[in-house]
Amino acid sequence: MTPGLRPEVTVNGVGIGLDGTDPATTALDWLRSRGLTGAKEGCAEGECGACAVMVARPGADSGTEWTALNSCLVPAASLDGQEVVTAEGLGTPERLHPVQRELARRGGSQCGFCTPGFVCSMAAEYYRDGRQPLDESARDVADDAVDDAADEAREPGHGCGANGFELEALSGNLCRCTGYRPIRDAAFALPEPAADDPLAARRTEAPPRAAATLLEGDSGRYVRPVDLADAIALLGEHPGAVLVAGSTDWGVEVNLRGARAALVIGLDRLAELRALSVGNDVIEIGAALSLTEVERGLAGRIPLLDKLFPQFASRLIRNGATIGGNLGTGSPIGDLLPALLALEADVVLTGPRGDREVAVADYFTGYRRSVRRPDELVRAVRVPVPLAPVTAFHKIAKRRYDDISSVAVAFALDIDGDVVRRARIGLGGVAATSVRARQTEAALEGRPWTVETVHAAADVLQGEGTPLDDHRASAAYRRAVLGTSLPRLYAETSPRQEASA
C-alpha cells in the first residue's frame, strides 16, 4: 500500500498530527492528551456516552453528516484525514452553542461529568438533515407523548419533539444524576441551525476522503488500506491481523482487557464494503456500513431489521457498529445474528480466490469460530426476497435498551390462510453460537396458526439450544423465556379474543 502523508486529524478546525501516537491509543485518550478534556471516560465500553464526539461522515447523498461516536472505542489512528468536533469546538463560555445554551437555561447540566457527551450527541441530532418542525397533527402526537418520551422513544410518533428532535439520539448517553427531564426539555427547545452556522454549512460539502494510513508504535501497527485489493493482499501477508470497522468490540478488548495486536487493519472506509443494493431477488448490504447507515438505506424494506435496530445497543453504538463486525466477532449474544438466521441471509466472503457465499446458518463452527479463512474478510450480507410477512424480534435483557441480551429470538413466518407455510427462527444467548430453532420450525410448518399449535411448538422451543448459567441469566430462565416467546408472537399477530382463548 502507499500510505498518506503525515497522519493528521482536523480537530475543531485545527490539524493535529498523530506523530508519536501508539496505534492502540483510543481517540478519547488522544484528545485528552491534547488538552481537550471535555470528553470523559466513564465506562470505557461505549455504554455511558460521556466520551461522545462528532465526526464528519458521508451523508445520504454526496454531502456530509455530523455523526456522534464513542471516542473511547475508536482508535485515534482511524481518524486520520477526518474531521472531529468536541464539546470545546462547539462553543465558548462567552458564545455558547445553541445546544449548550439550552442545556444551561433548563438545568440540564448537574454534576457536569456527562454533559459534554450529551452536548455532542445533541449537536449531531441538531444538525441532522431532515430534522424539521413537525406539522400540526404530528405536533399533537408529540405533545401527548412528552411525558412518556423517555420510555417510548423508539415507538413511532413518540420521543420526537415538535422541533423534529428525535430523543433516541441520546439513547447512548447516561446522566449519573438522573436529570433526564431538563435534558429532554433542552433537546425539544432547540431551534433550526442559523443560516450562518459553519457546521450546518459544512453539511453541503463533500465528506473527508478516506486516507491511506500507516501508524506504527510499540504495540504494533494500524493500517488503513487504499482499497479492497490492498486489504486482501495485506491480510494474506498477515493472516493474524485484527480487522476493525466500527471497533465497538475491539475497542472494549483494548480498554478493559489490555488487548493489543501486531497489526490492526481498518476497513471502515473501504468503498467496496460500503455498498447497499436492492434487487428483485436479493438485498445486498455492505459489511462496513454502520447499522445507522443500513437502517436509513433500507428505509423499511426489511421489517424484521426495523424491529431489531431500536433494541440494538444505542444510537451512538449503531453509528459505528457494522454487520461485518458482528459476523467477524461471532458473539453468541450478538443481536443481529438471530435476525440474519431468520432471514436466511448469506455471508459473502472475499479473499485471494475471489468471492464465495456461505449461509449464515452454516457460517459459525463454534464459539467465536467460523468458516472464514485467515486470508478472507466479510464483504457483504445478502438477504433473499420476497421476505416473510410475519416477523418479530424479542430481546430479553436486564435493561430495556442499550444492554446485552440474555436471550434474543427472531421470527420470520409465512402464514397463508391461517396455516404456517414456512417458519424460520433464529436464537441468540442459548448456545455457543447463534442457532436456528429447526425443531420448532418443523413443529410449526404445515400446521394451523392456532393456540394449540403455538403452545405445542413453544414446548419444543424450550428445548432448543444448550443454555448455560451465567451472570446475565440462568439456564432455566433462558428456557422459560424461550417458552413464552411463541405465545407472545401469537398474541402480537392474532386477534385479541383468539390470543386469550
Image: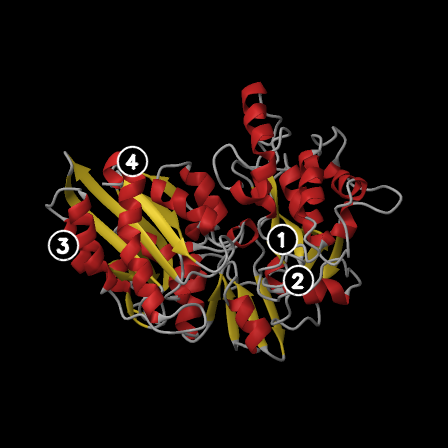
- Earlier sequence position, callout 2 versus callout 1: 2
Task: Specify the amino acid type for callout 2.
Answer: Pro
Give the mark toward the camera: 3 or 2: 3
- Residue 479 sits above or below residue 205 on the image: below
Q: Which residue is mark 2?
A: 7
- Earlier sequence position, callout 1 versus callout 4: 1
Give the mark toward the camera: 2 or 1: 1
Task: Specify the amino acid type for callout 1.
Answer: Asn
Callout 4 secondary element: helix
- Earlier sequence position, callout 3 versus callout 1: 1
Location of residue 370 by image quarter: bottom left
- Residue 12: horizontal and vertical position, in percent? 75, 50
Residue that extends furthest to the front in the rendered view of this protein = 501
Query: Foreground: 213 or 345?
Result: 345
- Earlier sequence position, callout 3 versus callout 2: 2
How packed is label 2: few (under 14 Cα within 10 Å), some, or many (20 or more)?
Answer: many
Q: Which residue is mark 3?
A: 442
Residue 182 in view of the camera: yes
- Location of the C terminus by quadrant is top left
Callout 3 secondary element: helix
- Earlier sequence position, callout 4 versus callout 2: 2
Q: Is 153 on the left-hand or right-hand side of 465?
A: right
Q: Residue at x 55, y 24 (%)?
A: 138
Give the mark toward the camera: 1 or 4: 4
- Residue 237 sits above or below residue 74 on the image: below
Between the C-alphas of marks 4 and 2, the distance is 61 Å
Residue that extends furthest to the left in the rendered view of this protein = 446
Q: Which residue is mark 4?
A: 496
Location of residue 378 by image quarter: bottom left
Q: Residue at x 64, y 53 (%)?
A: 82
Task: Specify the amino acid type for callout 3.
Answer: Ala
Q: Which residue is mark 1?
A: 173
